[in-house]
Amino acid sequence: MSKPTFALFLFLMFCSSFFAQQFKDDFTDKACRVDFHFCGNKEKTAVFLDKIKQEPFWGGRHGHFSTDLNLGDFRFRVLDSLTNQLIYIDGFSSLFHEWQSTAEAIKTSKCFEQTIQFPFPQRAVNLIFEKRLDFDNWQELFSYSLSPTDKLIQKTIPKAVPVKIISKTVAPEKAIDIAVIAEGYSAKEQQKFFKDAQRLANNLLTHEPFSKYKNRINIYAIAAASGQSGISLAKESGWKNTAVGSHFYTFYEARYLTTENSFNLRDLAALVPYDAIYVLANTSTYGGGGIYNFYALTAADNKLATQVTVHEFGHSFAGLADEYFYDKDVLDGTYDIKKEPWEPNITSLVQFDKKWRKKIPDGTAVPTPLSDTIKTNIGAFEGGGYLKKGIYRPCFDCRMKTNKAPEFCPVCKEAVERMILFLTEE
Protein backbone atom coordinates (compact mmCIF):
# COMPACT_ATOMS: atom_id res chain seq x y z
CA MET A 1 0.00 0.00 0.00
CA SER A 2 1.45 3.41 -0.98
CA LYS A 3 1.98 6.12 1.64
CA PRO A 4 -0.84 8.40 0.29
CA THR A 5 -3.25 5.44 0.17
CA PHE A 6 -2.29 4.35 3.67
CA ALA A 7 -2.73 7.92 4.95
CA LEU A 8 -6.21 8.11 3.39
CA PHE A 9 -7.07 4.76 4.95
CA LEU A 10 -6.03 6.02 8.40
CA PHE A 11 -8.03 9.23 7.91
CA LEU A 12 -11.18 7.32 6.98
CA MET A 13 -10.73 4.99 9.93
CA PHE A 14 -10.36 8.00 12.22
CA CYS A 15 -13.51 9.65 10.83
CA SER A 16 -15.51 6.45 11.23
CA SER A 17 -14.34 6.03 14.84
CA PHE A 18 -14.96 9.71 15.60
CA PHE A 19 -18.57 9.72 14.37
CA ALA A 20 -19.30 6.37 16.02
CA GLN A 21 -18.00 7.71 19.33
CA GLN A 22 -19.91 10.98 18.90
CA PHE A 23 -23.12 9.03 18.34
CA LYS A 24 -22.56 6.94 21.48
CA ASP A 25 -21.77 10.06 23.52
CA ASP A 26 -25.05 11.78 22.64
CA PHE A 27 -27.50 9.02 21.73
CA THR A 28 -28.61 5.45 22.32
CA ASP A 29 -29.48 2.87 19.66
CA LYS A 30 -33.21 3.48 20.19
CA ALA A 31 -35.38 6.17 18.60
CA CYS A 32 -37.17 9.13 20.15
CA ARG A 33 -40.50 9.79 18.48
CA VAL A 34 -42.41 12.99 19.08
CA ASP A 35 -46.11 13.00 18.20
CA PHE A 36 -47.75 16.39 17.82
CA HIS A 37 -50.44 18.27 15.95
CA PHE A 38 -50.06 21.02 13.38
CA CYS A 39 -53.07 23.32 13.79
CA GLY A 40 -54.10 26.51 12.08
CA ASN A 41 -55.29 27.95 8.80
CA LYS A 42 -53.80 29.68 5.76
CA GLU A 43 -52.20 32.39 7.89
CA LYS A 44 -51.52 30.62 11.19
CA THR A 45 -49.39 27.60 12.14
CA ALA A 46 -49.23 26.24 15.69
CA VAL A 47 -47.66 23.14 17.22
CA PHE A 48 -49.38 21.20 20.02
CA LEU A 49 -47.51 18.34 21.65
CA ASP A 50 -49.28 14.98 21.95
CA LYS A 51 -46.77 12.49 23.40
CA ILE A 52 -43.17 11.29 23.41
CA LYS A 53 -42.31 7.67 22.61
CA GLN A 54 -39.18 5.58 22.81
CA GLU A 55 -39.05 3.18 19.89
CA PRO A 56 -36.91 0.02 19.81
CA PHE A 57 -34.75 0.83 16.76
CA TRP A 58 -32.92 3.84 15.37
CA GLY A 59 -32.51 3.20 11.66
CA GLY A 60 -31.50 6.72 10.64
CA ARG A 61 -28.18 8.32 9.97
CA HIS A 62 -25.16 7.86 12.22
CA GLY A 63 -23.24 10.91 10.98
CA HIS A 64 -23.78 14.52 9.92
CA PHE A 65 -25.77 15.08 13.10
CA SER A 66 -25.49 18.87 13.16
CA THR A 67 -25.93 19.45 9.41
CA ASP A 68 -28.82 18.98 7.02
CA LEU A 69 -29.55 19.40 3.30
CA ASN A 70 -31.83 22.43 3.73
CA LEU A 71 -34.92 20.48 2.69
CA GLY A 72 -38.48 20.62 3.98
CA ASP A 73 -41.14 23.15 4.90
CA PHE A 74 -40.24 22.65 8.55
CA ARG A 75 -37.25 21.55 10.54
CA PHE A 76 -36.44 20.59 14.10
CA ARG A 77 -33.25 21.09 16.07
CA VAL A 78 -32.10 19.10 19.10
CA LEU A 79 -29.77 20.99 21.46
CA ASP A 80 -27.88 19.73 24.50
CA SER A 81 -29.68 21.38 27.43
CA LEU A 82 -26.46 22.16 29.32
CA THR A 83 -24.18 23.41 26.54
CA ASN A 84 -26.87 24.53 24.06
CA GLN A 85 -24.82 22.73 21.40
CA LEU A 86 -26.69 21.49 18.36
CA ILE A 87 -26.52 17.69 18.34
CA TYR A 88 -29.14 16.84 15.70
CA ILE A 89 -31.11 18.61 12.96
CA ASP A 90 -33.53 17.44 10.30
CA GLY A 91 -36.08 18.88 7.88
CA PHE A 92 -39.52 17.55 7.02
CA SER A 93 -42.76 18.43 5.30
CA SER A 94 -46.41 17.84 6.15
CA LEU A 95 -49.88 17.32 4.78
CA PHE A 96 -50.92 20.29 6.93
CA HIS A 97 -48.62 22.64 5.02
CA GLU A 98 -50.05 21.45 1.70
CA TRP A 99 -53.57 21.99 3.04
CA GLN A 100 -52.66 25.57 3.96
CA SER A 101 -52.37 26.37 0.24
CA THR A 102 -55.95 25.24 -0.50
CA ALA A 103 -59.09 27.37 -0.61
CA GLU A 104 -60.51 25.57 2.42
CA ALA A 105 -57.69 26.91 4.62
CA ILE A 106 -58.88 30.46 3.95
CA LYS A 107 -62.28 29.73 5.49
CA THR A 108 -61.56 27.36 8.37
CA SER A 109 -58.95 25.96 10.75
CA LYS A 110 -57.86 22.34 11.10
CA CYS A 111 -55.42 20.08 12.95
CA PHE A 112 -53.27 17.34 11.42
CA GLU A 113 -51.29 14.58 13.10
CA GLN A 114 -47.53 14.83 12.58
CA THR A 115 -44.49 13.02 13.94
CA ILE A 116 -40.73 13.42 13.94
CA GLN A 117 -38.03 10.98 14.97
CA PHE A 118 -34.40 11.25 16.09
CA PRO A 119 -31.98 9.05 18.03
CA PHE A 120 -32.95 8.72 21.68
CA PRO A 121 -30.76 11.12 23.68
CA GLN A 122 -28.43 10.19 26.52
CA ARG A 123 -29.06 13.49 28.33
CA ALA A 124 -31.71 16.18 28.60
CA VAL A 125 -32.21 18.15 25.38
CA ASN A 126 -34.14 21.14 24.11
CA LEU A 127 -36.27 20.46 21.06
CA ILE A 128 -37.08 23.38 18.75
CA PHE A 129 -39.57 23.31 15.83
CA GLU A 130 -39.18 25.89 13.07
CA LYS A 131 -41.15 26.88 9.98
CA ARG A 132 -39.44 27.92 6.77
CA LEU A 133 -40.06 31.53 5.76
CA ASP A 134 -38.00 31.38 2.58
CA PHE A 135 -34.94 29.62 1.23
CA ASP A 136 -32.63 30.72 4.04
CA ASN A 137 -34.85 31.96 6.88
CA TRP A 138 -36.75 30.17 9.65
CA GLN A 139 -39.29 31.09 12.30
CA GLU A 140 -39.47 29.31 15.65
CA LEU A 141 -42.86 27.73 16.33
CA PHE A 142 -42.41 25.66 19.45
CA SER A 143 -39.80 24.53 21.98
CA TYR A 144 -39.79 21.75 24.52
CA SER A 145 -37.39 20.49 27.19
CA LEU A 146 -37.10 16.72 26.97
CA SER A 147 -35.52 14.50 29.60
CA PRO A 148 -34.75 10.89 28.65
CA THR A 149 -35.69 9.81 32.19
CA ASP A 150 -39.19 11.32 32.03
CA LYS A 151 -41.50 8.59 33.32
CA LEU A 152 -44.27 9.66 30.95
CA ILE A 153 -42.24 8.77 27.85
CA GLN A 154 -44.08 5.80 26.40
CA LYS A 155 -42.14 2.66 25.55
CA THR A 156 -43.38 1.35 22.23
CA ILE A 157 -44.65 -2.21 22.36
CA PRO A 158 -44.37 -3.58 18.81
CA LYS A 159 -47.62 -4.77 17.31
CA ALA A 160 -48.02 -8.45 16.47
CA VAL A 161 -47.70 -7.94 12.73
CA PRO A 162 -45.88 -10.30 10.33
CA VAL A 163 -42.69 -8.79 8.89
CA LYS A 164 -40.76 -10.15 5.91
CA ILE A 165 -37.28 -9.05 4.85
CA ILE A 166 -37.53 -8.24 1.14
CA SER A 167 -33.92 -7.18 0.78
CA LYS A 168 -31.17 -6.79 3.37
CA THR A 169 -27.61 -6.13 2.31
CA VAL A 170 -25.98 -4.22 5.17
CA ALA A 171 -26.43 -3.20 8.81
CA PRO A 172 -29.16 -0.56 9.39
CA GLU A 173 -26.70 2.16 10.43
CA LYS A 174 -25.05 1.93 7.00
CA ALA A 175 -28.23 1.45 4.98
CA ILE A 176 -31.28 3.16 3.60
CA ASP A 177 -33.92 1.16 5.47
CA ILE A 178 -37.37 1.27 3.86
CA ALA A 179 -40.44 0.09 5.78
CA VAL A 180 -43.13 -0.97 3.30
CA ILE A 181 -46.51 -1.06 5.06
CA ALA A 182 -49.60 -2.91 3.85
CA GLU A 183 -52.75 -0.81 3.46
CA GLY A 184 -56.09 -2.25 2.41
CA TYR A 185 -54.91 -5.86 2.49
CA SER A 186 -57.10 -8.20 4.52
CA ALA A 187 -55.52 -10.95 6.63
CA LYS A 188 -56.26 -13.40 3.82
CA GLU A 189 -54.28 -11.22 1.38
CA GLN A 190 -50.99 -11.33 3.28
CA GLN A 191 -49.16 -13.28 0.59
CA LYS A 192 -50.46 -10.90 -2.09
CA PHE A 193 -48.97 -8.03 -0.11
CA PHE A 194 -45.58 -9.72 0.17
CA LYS A 195 -45.58 -10.31 -3.60
CA ASP A 196 -46.60 -6.71 -4.28
CA ALA A 197 -43.88 -5.43 -1.91
CA GLN A 198 -41.29 -7.56 -3.69
CA ARG A 199 -42.44 -6.17 -7.03
CA LEU A 200 -42.19 -2.60 -5.70
CA ALA A 201 -38.67 -3.27 -4.43
CA ASN A 202 -37.53 -4.95 -7.65
CA ASN A 203 -38.79 -2.00 -9.66
CA LEU A 204 -37.26 0.66 -7.44
CA LEU A 205 -33.84 -0.99 -7.54
CA THR A 206 -33.76 -0.89 -11.36
CA HIS A 207 -33.82 2.92 -11.38
CA GLU A 208 -30.81 5.17 -11.00
CA PRO A 209 -29.39 6.06 -8.63
CA PHE A 210 -31.06 3.36 -6.48
CA SER A 211 -29.59 0.63 -8.68
CA LYS A 212 -26.11 2.10 -8.19
CA TYR A 213 -26.50 1.92 -4.41
CA LYS A 214 -28.69 -1.17 -4.07
CA ASN A 215 -26.06 -2.73 -1.80
CA ARG A 216 -26.96 0.03 0.71
CA ILE A 217 -30.72 -0.48 0.65
CA ASN A 218 -32.69 -2.70 3.05
CA ILE A 219 -36.41 -3.21 2.48
CA TYR A 220 -38.87 -4.69 4.99
CA ALA A 221 -42.51 -5.62 4.29
CA ILE A 222 -44.89 -5.07 7.23
CA ALA A 223 -48.13 -7.00 6.65
CA ALA A 224 -50.61 -4.89 8.60
CA ALA A 225 -54.05 -6.49 8.20
CA SER A 226 -57.03 -4.32 7.28
CA GLY A 227 -60.58 -5.05 8.32
CA GLN A 228 -61.68 -4.64 4.71
CA SER A 229 -59.93 -5.14 1.40
CA GLY A 230 -59.29 -2.09 -0.78
CA ILE A 231 -58.93 1.65 -0.26
CA SER A 232 -61.45 4.36 0.59
CA LEU A 233 -62.62 6.32 -2.44
CA ALA A 234 -64.34 8.94 -0.26
CA LYS A 235 -67.13 10.58 -2.26
CA GLU A 236 -67.58 7.66 -4.69
CA SER A 237 -68.06 4.59 -2.49
CA GLY A 238 -67.60 5.54 1.13
CA TRP A 239 -65.00 4.62 3.69
CA LYS A 240 -63.30 1.30 4.39
CA ASN A 241 -61.80 -0.04 7.60
CA THR A 242 -58.10 -0.17 6.69
CA ALA A 243 -54.82 -0.38 8.58
CA VAL A 244 -53.83 3.29 8.29
CA GLY A 245 -57.05 4.87 6.99
CA SER A 246 -55.75 6.13 3.65
CA HIS A 247 -58.10 7.59 1.07
CA PHE A 248 -58.33 9.18 -2.35
CA TYR A 249 -59.76 12.68 -2.89
CA THR A 250 -57.33 14.36 -0.52
CA PHE A 251 -58.16 18.08 -0.74
CA TYR A 252 -60.93 16.97 -3.17
CA GLU A 253 -58.34 15.90 -5.76
CA ALA A 254 -59.39 12.46 -7.08
CA ARG A 255 -55.88 11.08 -7.68
CA TYR A 256 -54.33 12.30 -4.42
CA LEU A 257 -53.98 9.32 -2.06
CA THR A 258 -52.83 10.05 1.51
CA THR A 259 -53.42 9.16 5.14
CA GLU A 260 -53.89 11.50 8.08
CA ASN A 261 -53.32 8.72 10.65
CA SER A 262 -49.66 9.47 11.19
CA PHE A 263 -49.39 8.08 14.71
CA ASN A 264 -50.73 4.67 13.71
CA LEU A 265 -48.47 4.65 10.67
CA ARG A 266 -45.40 5.23 12.84
CA ASP A 267 -46.50 2.49 15.26
CA LEU A 268 -46.35 0.02 12.39
CA ALA A 269 -43.06 1.32 11.01
CA ALA A 270 -41.49 0.94 14.48
CA LEU A 271 -41.42 -2.83 13.97
CA VAL A 272 -38.19 -2.37 11.99
CA PRO A 273 -35.33 0.13 11.75
CA TYR A 274 -36.27 2.65 9.07
CA ASP A 275 -35.19 5.79 7.23
CA ALA A 276 -38.26 5.91 4.98
CA ILE A 277 -41.88 4.73 5.04
CA TYR A 278 -43.66 3.44 1.92
CA VAL A 279 -47.36 2.62 2.17
CA LEU A 280 -48.52 0.13 -0.45
CA ALA A 281 -52.25 0.46 -1.13
CA ASN A 282 -54.26 -2.55 -2.32
CA THR A 283 -56.15 -0.92 -5.18
CA SER A 284 -56.07 -0.61 -8.96
CA THR A 285 -57.29 3.01 -8.87
CA TYR A 286 -54.68 5.44 -10.18
CA GLY A 287 -53.08 7.66 -7.56
CA GLY A 288 -50.51 8.19 -4.89
CA GLY A 289 -48.81 10.73 -2.68
CA GLY A 290 -45.41 11.55 -1.24
CA ILE A 291 -44.41 13.96 1.54
CA TYR A 292 -40.77 14.69 2.26
CA ASN A 293 -39.27 12.80 5.21
CA PHE A 294 -42.72 11.50 6.13
CA TYR A 295 -44.17 8.82 3.82
CA ALA A 296 -44.94 7.79 0.26
CA LEU A 297 -48.13 6.01 -0.79
CA THR A 298 -48.85 4.20 -4.06
CA ALA A 299 -51.66 2.12 -5.56
CA ALA A 300 -50.19 -1.37 -5.95
CA ASP A 301 -52.35 -2.74 -8.78
CA ASN A 302 -52.68 0.20 -11.15
CA LYS A 303 -51.10 -0.31 -14.57
CA LEU A 304 -48.82 2.67 -13.89
CA ALA A 305 -47.81 1.50 -10.41
CA THR A 306 -44.14 1.00 -11.28
CA GLN A 307 -43.83 4.56 -12.60
CA VAL A 308 -45.78 6.12 -9.72
CA THR A 309 -43.78 4.17 -7.13
CA VAL A 310 -40.55 5.87 -8.18
CA HIS A 311 -42.18 9.29 -8.57
CA GLU A 312 -43.69 9.30 -5.09
CA PHE A 313 -40.49 8.04 -3.49
CA GLY A 314 -38.73 10.96 -5.16
CA HIS A 315 -40.98 13.24 -3.10
CA SER A 316 -40.73 11.48 0.24
CA PHE A 317 -37.10 10.41 0.14
CA ALA A 318 -35.26 13.24 -1.63
CA GLY A 319 -37.68 16.17 -1.33
CA LEU A 320 -38.24 16.43 -5.09
CA ALA A 321 -41.07 18.67 -6.25
CA ASP A 322 -43.74 17.87 -8.80
CA GLU A 323 -42.71 19.29 -12.17
CA TYR A 324 -46.14 19.09 -13.79
CA PHE A 325 -48.86 21.75 -13.94
CA TYR A 326 -52.56 21.90 -14.78
CA ASP A 327 -55.14 24.63 -15.16
CA LYS A 328 -56.61 25.41 -11.73
CA ASP A 329 -54.66 22.70 -9.90
CA VAL A 330 -55.86 22.24 -6.32
CA LEU A 331 -52.30 22.92 -5.10
CA ASP A 332 -51.46 25.80 -7.43
CA GLY A 333 -51.07 28.10 -4.42
CA THR A 334 -48.21 26.06 -2.99
CA TYR A 335 -45.36 28.27 -4.20
CA ASP A 336 -44.73 32.00 -3.89
CA ILE A 337 -42.83 32.86 -7.08
CA LYS A 338 -41.23 35.84 -5.31
CA LYS A 339 -39.27 33.36 -3.17
CA GLU A 340 -36.90 30.54 -4.07
CA PRO A 341 -38.50 27.14 -3.35
CA TRP A 342 -36.42 24.73 -1.25
CA GLU A 343 -36.98 21.71 -3.48
CA PRO A 344 -33.81 20.94 -5.49
CA ASN A 345 -35.53 20.41 -8.86
CA ILE A 346 -37.59 23.60 -9.26
CA THR A 347 -36.69 27.28 -9.15
CA SER A 348 -38.36 30.68 -9.29
CA LEU A 349 -34.99 32.06 -10.51
CA VAL A 350 -34.86 34.26 -7.37
CA GLN A 351 -31.83 32.34 -6.05
CA PHE A 352 -31.10 30.20 -9.07
CA ASP A 353 -27.36 30.22 -8.31
CA LYS A 354 -28.14 27.90 -5.40
CA LYS A 355 -29.78 25.40 -7.71
CA TRP A 356 -28.55 23.88 -10.99
CA ARG A 357 -27.50 27.03 -12.91
CA LYS A 358 -23.88 25.83 -13.18
CA LYS A 359 -25.03 22.66 -14.93
CA ILE A 360 -26.66 24.54 -17.82
CA PRO A 361 -24.53 24.39 -21.01
CA ASP A 362 -22.94 27.64 -22.17
CA GLY A 363 -25.13 29.54 -24.59
CA THR A 364 -28.41 28.12 -23.22
CA ALA A 365 -30.96 30.84 -22.57
CA VAL A 366 -32.51 31.24 -19.11
CA PRO A 367 -35.49 30.88 -19.13
CA THR A 368 -35.01 28.15 -21.72
CA PRO A 369 -37.30 28.21 -24.77
CA LEU A 370 -38.91 24.95 -25.85
CA SER A 371 -37.45 23.65 -29.10
CA ASP A 372 -36.63 20.22 -30.49
CA THR A 373 -32.90 20.99 -30.50
CA ILE A 374 -32.75 21.93 -26.82
CA LYS A 375 -35.25 19.52 -25.24
CA THR A 376 -32.47 17.12 -24.29
CA ASN A 377 -30.37 19.78 -22.52
CA ILE A 378 -30.44 20.90 -18.92
CA GLY A 379 -31.99 24.36 -18.76
CA ALA A 380 -34.70 26.29 -16.96
CA PHE A 381 -37.99 25.28 -18.62
CA GLU A 382 -41.05 27.19 -17.49
CA GLY A 383 -43.80 25.20 -15.78
CA GLY A 384 -43.61 23.18 -12.61
CA GLY A 385 -44.79 23.06 -9.02
CA TYR A 386 -48.42 23.10 -10.32
CA LEU A 387 -47.86 26.48 -12.01
CA LYS A 388 -47.60 27.23 -15.73
CA LYS A 389 -45.78 30.49 -15.08
CA GLY A 390 -43.09 31.59 -12.67
CA ILE A 391 -41.66 28.19 -11.69
CA TYR A 392 -38.98 26.44 -13.77
CA ARG A 393 -37.78 22.84 -14.01
CA PRO A 394 -34.37 21.48 -15.10
CA CYS A 395 -35.35 19.37 -18.13
CA PHE A 396 -38.12 19.14 -20.66
CA ASP A 397 -39.26 15.84 -19.14
CA CYS A 398 -38.47 13.80 -16.04
CA ARG A 399 -40.04 11.11 -13.88
CA MET A 400 -41.12 13.98 -11.59
CA LYS A 401 -43.10 15.47 -14.51
CA THR A 402 -44.70 12.59 -16.43
CA ASN A 403 -45.17 8.84 -16.22
CA LYS A 404 -43.77 8.57 -19.76
CA ALA A 405 -40.31 9.67 -18.69
CA PRO A 406 -38.28 6.48 -18.05
CA GLU A 407 -35.99 7.98 -15.39
CA PHE A 408 -35.24 10.97 -13.20
CA CYS A 409 -33.54 13.86 -14.98
CA PRO A 410 -29.83 14.48 -14.11
CA VAL A 411 -30.69 17.13 -11.49
CA CYS A 412 -33.16 14.84 -9.73
CA LYS A 413 -30.75 11.90 -9.87
CA GLU A 414 -28.10 14.01 -8.19
CA ALA A 415 -30.53 15.05 -5.46
CA VAL A 416 -31.45 11.42 -4.75
CA GLU A 417 -27.81 10.37 -4.71
CA ARG A 418 -26.94 13.21 -2.35
CA MET A 419 -29.59 11.96 0.08
CA ILE A 420 -28.38 8.35 -0.14
CA LEU A 421 -24.82 9.41 0.68
CA PHE A 422 -25.97 11.77 3.43
CA LEU A 423 -27.86 8.98 5.20
CA THR A 424 -25.36 6.18 4.75
CA GLU A 425 -21.93 7.75 5.03
CA GLU A 426 -20.40 9.02 8.25
Image (cartoon, grey):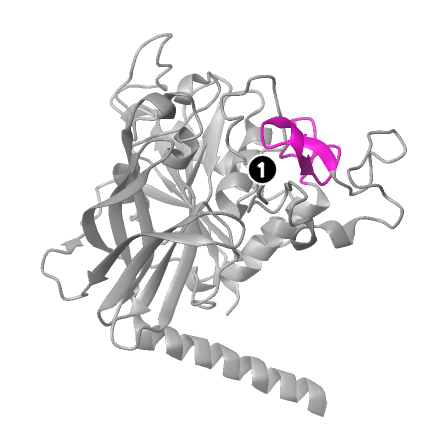
Which image quarter: residue 297? Answer: top left
Mark 1 element type: helix
- Specify the farthest residue to the left: 151
Q: Give the range drawn in magenta.
A: 381-408
Q: Mark 1 points at which residue?
A: 203
In-image side of 72 versus 388 (left or right): left
Q: Is residue 156 visible?
A: no
Q: Residue furthest top?
A: 236
Badge 1 amino acid: Asn
Please check the rendered image and state whether residue 392 is part of the magenta-colored stretch, yes or no: yes
Q: Where is residue 43 in the image (x, y as percent from the top left)?
A: 37, 34
Residue nearest the observer in this picture, 185 or 323: 323
Does residue 146 show up? yes
Q: Identify the residue at image location x=43%, y=25%.
A: 102
Residues packed near mark 1 inside 10 Å, few (<14), some (14 to 19) or many (20 plus): some
* Vertical position of residue 31 compared to residue 2: above or below: above
Number of dots carrying numbers: 1
Q: Is residue 331 inside the magenta stretch?
A: no
